[in-house]
Image (cartoon, grey):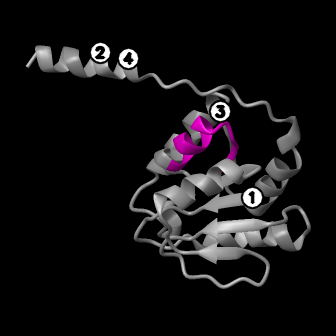
């Protein structure tokens, strides 16, 4: 099963769900479940829901073979912490999917570090799906200790 996460933003992400649906119709994806948030979309080839409990959401993540997600840090980190391969598609301001392009920067950084695959269009998504078996993601390790030290140093120097 492929889990698709569009997040809970107040803006729709129809571009991403259409990209995924195209891959289902082309035979590259099967058994797709979409957490669409506020994106209103009907499909005859994907199971789509708005929002569910965190318990059910975490269960779907654990049961999924891999995850296609928007560029939200929470969705990416939760997927990586569950040892899932991740393909991320950032929301872009030019399509009015977000106020700015911070998701593009987030996705670029995670991709550069070798944790995820990223794409911005149909062709890149198709290539990422086809080559997913060959992708060996870097194991994600939280760096909470470093972050705590930075915060403590900041507070100490106030």
Image quadrant occupied by the N terminus: bottom right
For marks 4 and 1, the one nearer the N-term is: 1
> Can residue 89 be seen in this snapshot?
no
Q: Nearer the viewer, mark 3 or mark 1?
A: 1
Q: Give left or right: position of 41 versus 125.
A: left
Q: In percent of the image, x 67 and y 29: which residue is there?
A: 114
Secondary structure, mark 1, is strand
Rate crowding at label 4 as few (under 14), some (14 to 19) or many (20 or more) other CA atoms within 10 Å.
few
Region of the chain picked out in magenta, as a range? 75-90
Front residue of 47 and 119: 47
Secondary structure, mark 4, is helix
Q: Quadrant of residue 154?
A: top left
Dot label at residue 115: 3
Dot label at residue 2: 1
Q: CA distance from mark 3 to mark 4?
A: 19 Å
For marks 3 and 2, the one nearer the N-term is: 3
* Residue topped by disc 2: 149
Q: CA distance from mark 3 to mark 2?
A: 24 Å
Q: Tags 4 and 2 in contact by the CB under 8 Å rule?
A: yes
Q: In percent of the image, x 88 and y 50: which residue is there?
A: 130
**Spot occupied by residue 116 in the image (x, y as percentages of width and height):** 67, 38
**Spot occupied by residue 13 in the image (x, y as percentages of width and height):** 55, 70
Q: CA distance from mark 3 to mark 1?
A: 18 Å
Q: Quadrant of residue 36?
A: bottom right
Q: Nearer the viewer, mark 1 or mark 2?
A: 1
Q: In percent of the image, x 70 and y 75: which residue is there?
A: 47
């Amino acid at each position: 099963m492929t889990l698709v996460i569009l997040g809970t933003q107040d803006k729709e992400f129809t571009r991403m769900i259409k990209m995924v649906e195209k891959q289902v119709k082309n035979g590259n994806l099967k058994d797709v479940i979409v957490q669409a948030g506020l994106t209103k979309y009907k499909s005859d080839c994907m199971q789509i829901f708005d929002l569910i409990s965190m318990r059910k959401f975490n269960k779907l993540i654990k049961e999924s073979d891999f995850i296609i997600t928007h560029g939200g840090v929470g969705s990416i980190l939760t997927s990586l912490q569950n040892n899932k391969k991740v393909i991320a598609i950032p929301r872009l301001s030019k399509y009015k999917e977000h106020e700015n392009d911070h998701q593009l920067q987030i996705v670029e950084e995670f991709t550069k570090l070798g944790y995820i695959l990223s794409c911005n269009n149909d062709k890149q998504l198709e290539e990422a799906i086809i080559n997913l078996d060959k992708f060996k993601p870097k194991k994600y390790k939280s760096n909470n200790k470093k972050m705590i030290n930075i915060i403590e140093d900041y507070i100490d120097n106030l």
